[in-house]
Image: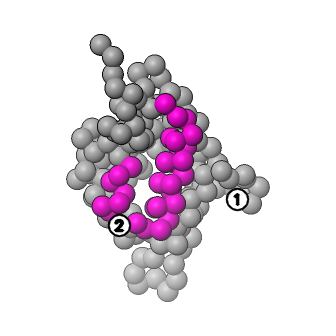
């Protein structure tokens, strides 16, 4: 049995471009209905420090909380490593620095946060061959060091 090429990832660059686009969309606080286009919602699994989330409803809960907790976010993507498997899916390693501000009432000022984050994703193709994240796992979170010294992509 052969699969349709539209059901297989064929371009590492398309996966990298989608990953960088995802982080840029997060920084712009794009509407939820645009953000779901990055995911395979029927089988989506997300694991963040805040917990595990499944499918569209889980992503909606996480996204709403993130958008209402953090502001002035900036993601600097340092690495997107892509390995496309024989079955047309991809294992993706992401290294990003995340900076944001948060405010907890009634504090007089906001607080800055900055973390280096390593993630692993499983990416599949939608029916048109576009990359969609099926699994998004935050593997490691450390306080960011030397922000200016790191190259970005």
- Are the residues tagged 2 and 1 within 8 Å (C-beta)? no
Q: Is residue 33 left or right of residue 25?
A: left
Residue named by callout 2: 31
User: At which x and y percent is residue 121?
Assistant: 45, 38
Q: Residues within 10 Å of mark 2 (few under 14, many from 20)?
A: few
Determine the image quadrant of residue 5: top left
Which residue is drawn at the image coordinates 46% and 61% (left, top)?
A: 25
Q: Nearer the viewer, mark 2 or mark 1?
A: 2
* Residue stretch rendered in magenta on the structure: 10-38
Tell me the crowding category of disc 1: few under 14, some 14 to 19, or many 20 or more residues within 10 angstroms, Cα based.
few
104 over 3 or under it: above or below = below
Q: Main secondary structure of the magenta part?
A: helix
Residue 106 % position (x, y): 41, 84
Q: Quadrant of the N terminus?
A: top left
Q: Residue at x 50, y 41 (%)?
A: 15
Q: Which residue corresponds to the image point at 28% horizontal and 58% vertical from the top-left?
A: 60
The answer to whether residue 36 is above or below residue 14 is below
Q: Is residue 18 magenta?
A: yes
Task: Identify the residue position indicated by label 1 in the image.
Answer: 147
Q: Is residue 130 left or right of residue 14?
A: left
Residue 45 appears anywhere in the view = no
Give the left or right position of residue 115, taking residue 65 as reference. Answer: right
């Amino acid at each position: 049995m052969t699969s349709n090429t539209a059901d297989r990832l064929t371009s590492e660059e398309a996966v990298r471009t989608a990953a960088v686009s995802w982080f840029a969309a997060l920084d712009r606080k794009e509407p939820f209905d645009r953000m779901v286009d990055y995911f395979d919602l029927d089988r989506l699994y997300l694991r963040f420090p805040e917990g595990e989330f499944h499918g569209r409803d889980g992503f909606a809960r996480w996204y709403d909380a993130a958008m209402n907790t953090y502001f002035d976010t900036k993601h600097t993507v340092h690495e997107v490593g892509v390995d496309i498997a024989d079955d047309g899916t991809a294992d993706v390693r992401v290294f990003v620095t995340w900076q944001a501000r948060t405010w907890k009432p009634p504090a007089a000022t906001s607080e800055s946060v900055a973390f280096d984050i390593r993630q692993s994703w499983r990416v599949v193709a939608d029916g048109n061959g576009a990359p969609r994240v099926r699994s998004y796992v935050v593997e490691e979170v450390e306080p960011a060091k030397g922000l200016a010294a790191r190259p970005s992509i």
